[in-house]
Amino acid sequence: MSTTLTSTGIQFNDSTVNATASRNMGKLLSVQSWQSPGTYTWTRPTDCTKVLIQVQGAGGGGCSYSESGGAGGYSERLLDVTGISSATVTVGGGGGNTGYYSAAGNGGTSSFGSYVSASGGYGANQNASHTGGQSGIGSGGNLNIICGGGTGHQNTGGSAIGVGGKSYFGSGFRASHNVNTSNITSTAVGAGGCGGRDAGWAGSNGGSGIVIVYNYS
């Protein structure tokens, strides 16, 4: 038999049952999200008993010669909030770009109170010279992910520019050789900034983080 979701939990193909998994999440009351870097307050809505939290750290910045930033980490958690009235929400800002051959800025950490957090990705050259930044990591969740790392040094010539590390929500922008990468603002949330074409072209900034909360009765 296949794995199925029953009224008592998850029943696996060997007939064992995980009774801690609830079939009924309750009614979805609202969805809240915060994407601009800063600090906010989540207040438990009336009748809310559970929340599903998604936390994405910010991406690191990119440098020249295709050296791109790493994505922020990701964490996800289902949390009983019957005893929680409010929580501080923090959204990390993307790491700043730089030119050859400095270290680009690291992305900021995003978090939901002390319950779930995801650190920002490293900027290019932060972990080692002429390398892409490493990813951040999620913590405190039921699901904690290390996302994509940035690309290392390449002599690009006429080829495309090094793409930033992919976050849970999407890819960093991949520019062509004639696009001024320092002006790119379309990087996915939490993704690393792309690398510039050569020594005269700076990379792009990393994508900011995001926190999403699904409020259930």
Image (cartoon, helix red, strand yellow):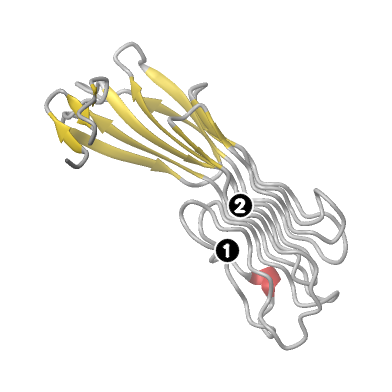
Q: CA distance from mark 2 to mark 1?
A: 8 Å
What percent of the width, then of the height, locates residue 93?
Answer: 61, 46
Label 2 Cα crowd, 10 Å radius (few <14 / some 14-19 / many 20+): many
Q: Quadrant of the C terminus?
A: top left
Q: Amino acid at mark 2?
A: Ala
Residue assigned mark 2: 71
Toward the left, the furthest residue is: 7
* 29 over 125 or under it: above or below: above
Asked if labels 1 and 2 touch by Cβ distance under 8 angstroms, the answer is: yes
Q: Nearer the viewer, residue 118 or 181?
A: 118
**Label whose residue precedes the other's in the sequence (2 or 1):** 2
Q: Residues within 10 Å of mark 1 (few under 14, many from 20)?
A: many
**Image disc number at residue 23:** none
**Residue 115 % position (x, y):** 48, 23
Amino acid found under the numbered disc labelled 1: Gly
Instruction: State the image coordinates of residue 166 (x, y, percent, origin top left).
Output: 56, 58
